[in-house]
Image (tube, grey):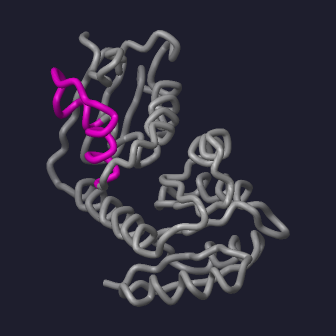
Amino acid sequence: MTYAILLVEDDIEISEMVKSQIMKEGFKVIQAFDGESALQQFSAEAIDLILLDVMLPKASGMDFLQLVRKQSTIPVLIMSAKDSEVDKAVGLGLGADDYITKPFSMIELTARVKAAIRRAKNYSKFAEKDVTTIINIGKLTVDLDNYLVTKENLEIKLTSKEFLILRMFLSSPNRVFTKAQIYQSVWNNDYFGDENVINVHMRRLREKIEDDPSHPQYIKTIWGIGYKLGEF
């Protein structure tokens, strides 16, 4: 199977360089050079992953990301020259799965693309299982096979990453996970010490499942170590 990647980058030289490298790995690459054409390509093509620059003409990368997340949970990897913690937090907070800072090595970019595709593929297999496994914890009901989380009969919309984080804790209810272990398990990649990725996803997950995110009960912080599932 050939996976299709939507490459949204207004710098033609960078776009061609990335396209050439990604195609060598067997991926189909669809190019867009501004926010408007990216939306058109996203609507017209079956896309498996998006490589997204933030600074785009006509419509910003962040605006495009928000529109994508209203329709899809496919992996989105931001490529940006902005490397501040705030910029990364904004991108991840809007639903990006990963963030790579320019200039980046083609080896690292390729590795992250492959890891994201692999996670999405594994998730699809997981969601297509026939036997339903349902876990009840506190006010939450988690249907592991149908990627469904409800709280007091109201559906909670989780991204694939948020769901995988919750699933990880449910699979080992007594285990304390470090940030490195969470990253390696959910992102299926080596941990480079970027705590902001974990912090943002954890905050977003807590905002959705906790009664009071500032005093979490479902995912407890073990100070100086990591996180573990709360007891109910």
> Looking at the picture, does residue 163 appear above or below residue 123?
above
Q: Position of residue 130 (x, y in %)?
A: 17, 54
Lateral position of residue 37 relative to residue 181, left or right? right
Residue situated in front as seen by the camera: 72 or 202: 202
> Looking at the picture, does residue 105 appear above or below residue 76?
below
Q: Magenta stretch: give its range.
A: 167-188
Image quarter (top left, top right, bottom left or bottom right) of the C terminus: top left
Residue situated in front as seen by the camera: 56 or 190: 190
Lateral position of residue 83 relative to residue 104, left or right? right
Residue situated in front as seen by the camera: 189 or 232: 189
Q: What residue is rendered at 45% in x and 43% in y? A: 194
Q: What residue is rendered at 57% in x and 85% in y? A: 17
Q: What residue is rendered at 26% in x and 60% in y? A: 122
Q: What residue is rendered at 18% in x and 39% in y? A: 133
Lateral position of residue 101 relative to residue 113, left or right? right
Q: Position of residue 88 (x, y in %)?
A: 60, 46
Quarter assignment of residue 58: bottom right
Quarter assignment of residue 148: top left
> Looking at the picture, does residue 77 appear above or below residue 185?
below
Q: Position of residue 139 (x, y in %)?
A: 36, 17
- In the image, is residue 175 part of the stretch drawn in magenta? yes
Lateral position of residue 135 relative to residue 42, left or right? left
- In the image, is residue 164 part of the stretch drawn in magenta? no
Residue situated in front as seen by the camera: 133 or 106: 106
Image quarter (top left, top right, bottom left or bottom right) of the N terminus: bottom left
Q: Position of residue 117 (x, y in %)?
A: 36, 67
Quarter assignment of residue 174: top left
